[in-house]
Image (cartoon, grey):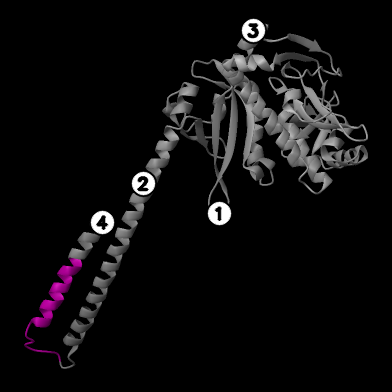
C-alpha cells in the first residue's frame, strides 16, 4: 500500500507539471507546432496513467481485504489445530513432519522444534518401521486402495522422548488440493495402551464379576449364555449363523478385546467357533449395569463389533462377485491382518499383510453370497495377477499395493 501511495504522488507531480506547461504563454512555437501536439499527447497519457493508478489502488485494497480475511481464517485454523484434543501431525507425502499440535507434542514428549522437519518414522519403534514405510509407499501409488479411500488405520509402537514406547492407533488421511493432487498427510495419534491396561486391570481386579474365564482349543464350539456378554481375552472367534440349507454363514470375527454374545443379536441361530486357541471371559449383563467403569470400558468394544458388522454388510452392496470378494479381503486385512515379509524365491522377498487365521473357502463364499468353486477360481485369478500368495503355514497373504 505504501508503494501505491508513493506512485500516486509521483504521478500527481507529473500531472501538475504538464498542466503548468499548458498554462504557460507560448512565446514561440516551431513552424510545425510540434510542442502543442506533444503536450496534448503527454496530457492524455498522464490522464490514462492516473486512471490506471486508481484501478491499481482499488485492486490493492481488494487484495489487502482478501489477505486480511485469509490471515483470519489461517489464525482460526491454526487455533483449532493447535488446541484440538486429538494429537495431530501434518507431514509431506514422504513423511516429513510439517506441523504438530500441542496434543501431539505432549503425547510424544518432544518440543515442537524437535519434530518439525524431522521424518515421522523416527518416532516409530524399529519393529514397526517396515509397516510404516510400506504404508507411505502405498499412499504414493496412484492406484493404491489407501489413496482411493483417503484414509487408513494401523497400530504401531511410538517412541516418547524418554525412550519408552506406547501402543498407538494411527489414522492417516490424504489431503488433496483443488486439482485433486495429494499434497499432505494428516496423522491422528491415539494412545491405546491405556485402554488395554484398563481392560487388563479390570480382568485382574474384578475376577469376581465374571462367571468364569476359560480356555478353548481351535475348532471348539463356544458356549453362548443368554443375558451375558463374552469378551475375547486372547485369540480369534468366528461368528456364524445357519442358512435354510444348514450351511454356515460368516457374520463376523471377534478378535482380542472384542465382545460378542446372545444379547447382541436377533439371529435365531448364532454360533461362536474358536478359529485359534481362545481365552474367553463371560460377563453377566447385571454386572455391567452395576459397574459404571466396566460399562465405559466395554462400550468401545461394542462399537467395534457393530462397525465390523456394518462393514460385512457393505460387502453385499457390490454387484460383481469379484468386487465383493476383494472388498471382503480388504475388511479382513484391517480386522485380522498383520504385516509380514516372505521369500517367494531365493532372490525376491514380498511384503504384505498376512491374515493371521485360516478361513475356509466356504467362509469366504458365505460372506460373499457365492459358492466355494467361485472363491477357488477368484483366488486363483488373484494369485496369477500377483495380488495374493500363501506363506509356509498356508496363511493367505495380501501383497502390498494390491488392496
Whichever of labels 4 and 1 marks the residue nearer the N terminus, that label is: 4
Residue 1 badge? 4
Q: CA distance from mark 4 to mark 1?
A: 32 Å
- For the C terminus, the quadrant is top right
Bin the neighbour count of mark 1 within 10 Å (Cα to Cα): few under 14, some 14-19, many 20 and up: few
Residue found 29% across the figure and 70% down from its top: 52
Dot 2: what SS? helix
Dot 3: what SS? helix
Residue 71 badge? 2
* Eye-nearest disc, 1 or 3: 3
Whichever of labels 1 and 3 marks the residue nearer the N terminus, that label is: 1
- Image-quadrant location for residue 166: top right
* Eye-nearest disc, 3 or 4: 3
* Eye-nearest disc, 2 or 4: 2
The residue indicated by pointer 3 is 204
The residue indicated by pointer 1 is 179
Bin the neighbour count of mark 4 within 10 Å (Cα to Cα): few under 14, some 14-19, many 20 and up: few
Magenta stretch bounds: 10-30
Residue 339, horizontal then vertical, whole percent: 71, 27
Side of 324 relative to 11 (left or right): right
Residue 278, horizontal then vertical, whole percent: 78, 15
**Taking 118 as reference, is 222 above or below it?**
above
**Considering depth in this image, is 345 or 246 the residue closer to the camera?**
246
Side of 12 relative to 166 (left or right): left
Whichever of labels 2 and 3 marks the residue nearer the N terminus, that label is: 2
- Image-quadrant location for residue 175: top right
Dot 4: what SS? loop
Q: Main secondary structure of the magenta part?
A: helix
Whichever of labels 3 and 4 marks the residue nearer the N terminus, that label is: 4
Marks 2/4 in contact by CB < 8 Å: the verdict is no
- Residue found at the very far bottom of the displayed protein: 31
Amino acid at each position: 500500500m505504501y508503494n501505491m501511495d508513493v506512485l500516486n504522488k509521483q504521478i500527481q507531480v507529473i500531472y501538475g507539471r504538464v498542466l503548468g506547461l499548458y498554462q504557460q504563454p507560448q512565446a514561440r512555437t516551431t513552424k510545425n507546432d510540434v510542442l502543442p501536439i506533444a503536450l496534448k499527447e503527454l496530457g492524455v497519457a498522464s490522464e490514462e496513467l492516473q486512471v490506471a493508478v486508481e484501478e491499481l489502488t482499488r485492486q490493492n485494497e481488494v487484495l489487502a481485504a482478501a489477505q486480511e480475511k485469509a490471515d483470519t481464517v489461517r489464525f482460526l485454523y491454526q487455533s483449532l489445530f493447535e488446541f484440538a484434543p486429538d494429537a495431530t501431525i501434518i507431514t509431506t507425502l514422504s513423511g516429513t513432519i510439517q506441523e504438530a499440535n500441542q496434543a501431539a507434542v505432549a503425547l510424544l514428549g518432544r518440543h515442537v522444534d524437535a519434530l518439525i522437519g524431522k521424518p515421522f518414522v523416527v518416532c516409530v519403534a524399529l519393529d514397526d518401521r517396515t509397516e510404516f514405510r510400506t504404508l507411505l509407499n502405498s499412499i504414493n501409488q496412484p492406484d493404491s486402495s489407501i489413496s482411493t479411500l483417503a484414509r487408513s488405520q494401523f497400530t504401531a509402537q511410538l517412541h516418547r522422548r524418554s525412550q519408552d514406547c506406547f501402543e498407538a492407533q494411527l489414522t492417516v488421511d490424504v489431503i488433496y488440493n483443488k486439482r485433486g493432487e495429494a499434497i499432505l498427510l494428516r496423522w491422528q495419534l491415539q494412545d491405546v495402551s491405556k485402554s488395554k491396561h484398563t481392560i487388563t486391570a479390570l480382568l485382574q481386579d474384578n475376577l469376581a464379576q465374571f462367571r468364569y474365564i476359560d480356555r478353548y482349543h481351535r475348532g471348539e464350539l463356544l458356549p453362548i449364555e443368554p443375558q451375558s456378554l463374552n469378551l475375547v481375552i486372547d485369540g480369534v472367534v468366528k461368528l456364524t449363523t445357519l442358512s435354510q440349507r444348514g450351511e454356515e454363514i460368516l457374520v463376523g470375527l471377534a478378535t482380542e478385546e472384542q465382545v460378542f454374545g446372545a444379547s447382541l443379536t436377533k439371529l435365531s441361530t448364532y454360533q461362536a467357533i474358536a478359529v485359534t486357541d481362545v481365552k474367553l471371559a463371560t460377563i453377566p449383563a447385571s454386572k455391567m449395569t452395576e459397574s459404571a467403569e466396566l460399562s465405559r470400558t466395554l462400550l468401545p468394544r461394542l462399537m467395534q463389533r457393530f462397525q465390523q458388522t456394518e462393514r460385512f454388510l457393505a460387502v453385499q452392496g457390490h454387484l460383481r462377485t469379484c468386487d465383493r470378494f476383494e472388498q471382503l479381503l480388504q475388511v479382513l486385512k484391517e480386522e485380522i491382518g498383520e504385516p509380514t515379509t516372505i521369500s517367494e524365491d531365493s532372490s525376491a522377498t514380498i511384503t504384505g499383510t498376512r491374515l493371521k487365521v485360516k478361513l475356509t473357502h466356504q467362509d469366504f463364499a458365505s460372506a460373499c453370497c457365492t459358492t466355494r468353486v467361485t472363491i477357488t477360481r477368484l483366488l486363483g485369478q488373484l494369485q496369477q495377477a500377483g495380488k495374493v500368495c500363501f506363506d509356509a503355514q498356508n496363511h493367505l497373504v495380501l501383497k502390498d499395493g494390491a488392496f
